[in-house]
Image: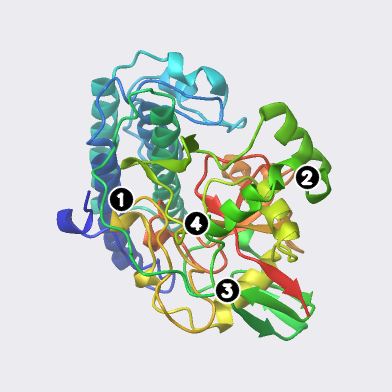
């Protein structure tokens, strides 16, 4: 599946210094491009594919399509278009995710039971809201605050584009037929470079978003952190290296595991990354392009924080902090962001790194687990109103991941971006990079 051939997905991040009319025109193009990208992601799927929910943490594709539309209807059209009437008042509950300030929500674990509205009804809903929002942008009457919400909604939809891919992958994995979402594309054939280390000096540093474009509220404010001298690995941990950990009995050595991680290993009988299965003497991995042999040089993916941490201990290393990761992304020559393996490549699976000196693969391929808990930066205040529930209310019992993955839209990621998941989550495209103290 190629996205580039069907029109650009990339766009420049908003410049809040530009004239409102220019910003509205820019947002109109970006909104239309992102909505079109979502349609293309859903195009290979049947109505039956878009209906089921494989686990409470996942959502049906139909729900993603409706919820991203609900966001624009609820937070843009209703407050700014006096003539607008809800497409269906019941959708306000059915497709509200977690905004308590807006009202009731349909229970998250039961989203797969929503056989109605039909997929065709949801597509009509999308078209209705899109046309009204585009007309509102064309009228040129929206103030800066409304344009800010539209920009937030565009990035919100890009988050759900990634979730469509992760949730479809988990759904298809439950099917003995092992359906193929997209024809597998060739992956990079080069061998992984040998593991090497880059040293970073300690000291007082600034991290966090400092302005100059879009950022989520949890990336702010920019602030000072003390970082000790350390080393970062030049690349992600490979599947072959993780196989060595498995062959050495890593899943059976409690000394390597955090207490909650060892409980998860025992109760859930983990013995390999999610989507790995052993057929005779061969390890195979399920991908969105179907099942195939595990390639030892590609990055290992679909690990929980517990597995990533246990591997790091086994390797005599540790996970980096999010500050260490961000500083590396800011000061190391990582190459053009456009060279990373993102959603736009259509591979939907991590690739072995390209040759080169220094720290590689900081962006794309896999989300990198850090050791940092997801908490507020010093001075953080959530926005007022319902949109204040977007990030701040989840700052407990979650761990930060950095860098984006092969399912992340390229224009959605930046060095300050903070993703977060519970430590036992494995269905996301998550892997790891090693760090060491100096």
Mark 3 = which residue? Answer: 195
- Rendered location of residue 156, percent (x, y): 45, 47
- Rendered location of residue 325, percent (x, y): 63, 70
Label 2 to label 4: alpha-carbon separation: 26 Å
48 or 353, nearer to the observer: 353
Instruction: Report whether residue 78 is seen.
Output: no
Relative to 162, say whether 52 is above or below: above
Mark 1 = which residue? Answer: 34
Which is more N-terminal, label 3 or label 4?
A: 3
Q: Is residue 87 left or right of residue 216?
A: left
Residue drawn at x 43%, y 74% as measured from the top left:
17
Mark 2 = which residue? Answer: 253
Which is more N-terminal, label 4 or label 1?
A: 1
Relative to 210, say whether 283 is above or below: above
Label 2 to label 1: alpha-carbon separation: 46 Å
Mark 4 = which residue? Answer: 366
- Rendered location of residue 327, percent (x, y): 63, 76
Label 4 to label 3: alpha-carbon separation: 17 Å
Single out the mark in the foreground, 2 or 1: 2
Q: Quadrant of residue 262?
A: top right
């Amino acid at each position: 599946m190629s996205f580039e051939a069907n029109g650009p997905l990339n766009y420049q991040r908003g410049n809040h210094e530009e004239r409102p009319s220019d910003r509205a025109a820019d947002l109109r193009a970006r909104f239309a491009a992102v909505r079109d990208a979502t349609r293309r992601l859903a195009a290979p799927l049947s109505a039956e594919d878009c209906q089921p929910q494989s686990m409470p943490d996942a959502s049906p594709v139909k729900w993603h399509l409706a919820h991203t539309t609900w966001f624009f209807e609820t937070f843009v059209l209703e407050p700014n278009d006096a003539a607008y009437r809800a497409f269906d008042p019941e959708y306000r509950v059915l497709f509200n995710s977690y905004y308590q300030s807006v009202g009731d929500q349909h229970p998250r674990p039961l989203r797969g039971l929503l056989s109605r509205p039909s997929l065709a009804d949801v597509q009509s809903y999308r078209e209705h809201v899109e046309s009204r929002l585009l007309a509102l942008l064309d009228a040129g009457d929206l103030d800066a605050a409304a344009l800010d919400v539209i920009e937030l909604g565009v990035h919100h939809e890009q988050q759900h584009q990634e979730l469509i891919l992760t949730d479809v992958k988990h759904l298809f994995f439950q099917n003995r037929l092992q359906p193929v979402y997209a024809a597998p594309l060739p992956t990079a054939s080069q061998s992984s470079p040998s593991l090497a280390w880059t040293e970073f000096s300690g000291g007082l540093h600034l991290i966090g978003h400092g302005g100059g474009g879009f950022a989520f509220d949890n990336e702010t404010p920019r602030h000072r952190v003390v970082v000790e001298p350390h080393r970062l690995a030049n690349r992600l941990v490979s599947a072959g290296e993780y196989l060595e950990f498995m062959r050495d009995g890593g899943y059976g050595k409690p000394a390597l595991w955090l207490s909650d991680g060892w409980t998860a290993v025992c109760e859930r009988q983990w013995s390999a990354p999610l989507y790995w299965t052993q057929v005779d003497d061969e390890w195979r991995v399920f991908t969105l392009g179907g099942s195939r042999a595990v390639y030892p040089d590609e990055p290992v993916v679909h690990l929980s924080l517990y597995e990533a941490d246990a591997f790091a201990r086994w390797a005599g290393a540790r996970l980096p902090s999010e500050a260490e990761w961000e500083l590396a992304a800011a000061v190391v020559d990582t190459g053009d962001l456009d060279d990373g393996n993102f959603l736009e490549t259509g591979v939907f699976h991590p690739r072995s790194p390209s040759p080169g000196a220094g720290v590689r693969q900081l962006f794309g391929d896999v989300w990198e687990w850090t050791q940092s808990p997801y908490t507020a930066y010093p001075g953080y205040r959530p926005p007022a109103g319902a949109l204040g529930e977007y990030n701040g209310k989840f700052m407990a019992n979650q761990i930060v991941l950095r860098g984006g993955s092969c399912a992340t839209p390229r224009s959605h990621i930046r060095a300050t971006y903070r993703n977060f998941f519970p430590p036992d989550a494995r269905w996301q495209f998550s892997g790891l990079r090693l760090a060491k103290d100096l």
